[in-house]
Image (cartoon, rainbow, N blue to C red):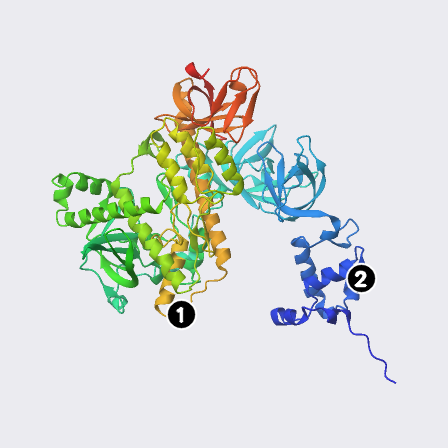
Amino acid sequence: MSIKKKPKLRNLDPHLEREKERYGHAVPSREFMLQILKEQGIPMNEKALQNLLEITEEENEIFGRRVSAMLREGQLMRNRKGDICVVEKLDLIKGKVQGHADGFGFLIPDDGSPDLFLSAKEMHKALHGDRVMVREIGVDRRGRREGTIVEVLERAVTHLVGRLHADHGILFVEAENRRISQDILIPREESLDARAGQVVMVNIIQQPSKNAQPIGRIVEILGEYTAPGMEIEIALRKHDLPYQFPPEVEKLSTKFPANVLKTELMEREDIRHLPLVTIDGETARDFDDAVYCERDGKGYKLYVAIADVSHYVHPHDALDREALTRGNSVYFPRRVIPMLPEVLSNGLCSLNSQVERLCMVCEMSLDGTGDFSEYRFYPAVMYSHARLTYTKVASMLEDPKGEDAKEYKNLLPHIQLLYKLFKVLLKAREKRGAIDFETIETQMIFNDQGKIECILPVKRNDAHRLIEECMLAANVCASDFLKKHKQPTVYRIHEGPTPEKLVALRDFLKEFGLQLGGGDAPSAKDYARTLTKIKDRLDAQLLQTVMLRSLRQAVYSPDNVGHFGLAYESYTHFTSPIRRYPDLLVHRAIKAVLTGTVYSPGDWHELGIHCSQTERRADDATRDVEAWLKCYYMQDKIGECFDGVISGVTGFGLFVALHGVYVEGLVHISELPSDYFHFDAAKHMLLGERGGKRYRLGDRLRVKVVRVDLETSKIDFVLAGNGE
């Protein structure tokens, strides 16, 4: 009688075939290894695990790589004996470290559970951004969950920018990113002979541990801290913004012709006869869009021509890979970090006047009320008849007999018709209920030394709004076109307030005798109605600010949930492919539909997340630069008094925005009149316990500048005059 052989344990792996298909080998899957380790019930020596799973000598290397990957990703960890443990069994929490300038930090858990406090002592083991495993050890004195770092899974910081300091012969770098509170020690032989006070780039050569500080090597000396343009150099490196094009991109850029080739005009519609114009700011150098409008019966026909970037930047080539990495152009005061090389961004793709350019056109027919009767997309060749500015267009509309109108007399009737359409679209916007928050944008005016001379408000005129409405119309059509044809894309989505923020907003408005309609699911129209009610009130700015802060940020996503603020059921970005990668994706998707194919660049969700992150990164970097420049501007104003308005209320004080100066600073809570002040987050207020004095968002104050700190980009005020 033959004896049946017991099957190999590894053959019971339900994912064996998947592993063979994916990797060409049958090493046990992660799921099966975790299952076996859990069944054993104890930590296992790696050799014992190999024997149990009958790993052959030829499979040792592959198996070792799998174990290393599981250790790296926090599925497994080694104990002090070196045995392998299942992390789930150890009650450890995986997540990312978020550092604080004061030395402590928090673990942001992967599973979305509440954050854990990490003391300054614990933060000696890791740097901001590191992925770690933490064990919960109780609660701190403020009742927050507290943890201890058990293992660092992944080091996030390999290089950083900061200032070199010397103390008793010891060199160290203080990181510009204040969330990295640990000083980086620099051995003399790794200093490049940099001088104390200079800004340097550092590579981390030894990561921090429980008993040792991080050690670094200086790889680049950027220069003196206050040198012109240094604030931008720091921001680029602090936020890891790519600012140099790699050699393969530069090489590819040299192959483009100076002008559009005749062979490129085939299978394109010719709209060179249409008097399309670009309308942008005075300092603009890349022109994405051109517009033209004509009568169509009782309605209008609007042409929005957009630079055909997708004709030149092909999926997965060097240009495309770099554009994806950058995600968008970054606009600093007096300097732009473009998404695409200059030969494209300011040249071949830019819709410069008096030259032929390739474009993608959205041609829309609208009735007298601004509703779309039809639209179509097509590739074309165009000719921009003029490079107009917002200021000139506003002047032409205001004074049809003035100098600007005379200069462009052939284009004036077309501009006036565009303006009539704009008025129609504006009424449609109001009817739709789109939210229109009044915000003040500013422009920095610089002197010859590259420092701020003054900060001026940028007045939005009807020309700005005219172009905005034309772009919105084209974006809506692009979204509708892709949705109808079931072509996946990244939509620009904007969700309404969270339930918690909605409750807080309603409670706040109630104090002012106001209500927000819409029940548990208010619409943009409900917000718009409330904004209309408050626009003439003295406290309108306060109420508008609180309403604006109740909304979420707009992001990119393939899940079309609509755009709350604009009151659109479907919306995407089509009009700026020179400076935004999502727009380039949308162009490719539209072309795929036109040619009867399907465009699939990869995981649309990941692309949406990445593009949203690069957008935030650019915002953070430009905010840093502007904050530093404003500090530099305020240096010689210490002791001066200004009128301002409370722009933010926190538990540690009041942020005050100065009138006419457009600079913000802090009145620390300790500088308020003698009392115990308590922070009421729901009411955006600090309230004095004994005297009942209150300081609320939107209140006017007179303050005195007492301190300007360039290193932290912070300005401190104290109350002056009627503020006391």
Left or right of 157 in this view: 94: right
Residue 631 visible: yes
Mark 2 or mark 1: whose residue is earlier in sequence: 2
Amino acid at pointer 1: Thr
Question: Real-space Cα distance between discs 2 and 1?
Answer: 53 Å
SS at badge 2: helix
Residue 138 screen position, x and y as percent: 72, 37
Residue shown at the point (76%, 62%) measured from the top left: 36
Label 1 neighbour load within 10 Å: few <14, some 14-19, many 20+: few
Query: Quadrant location of the N terminus?
Result: bottom right
Residue shown at the point (31%, 52%) measured from the top left: 473
Residue 246 visible: no
Label 1 sits on residue: 597
Quarter assignment of residue 459:
top left
Residue 76 screen position, x and y as percent: 71, 54
Amino acid at pointer 2: Ala
- Checking the image for residue 48, the label placed there is 2
Residue 515 screen position, x and y as percent: 44, 35
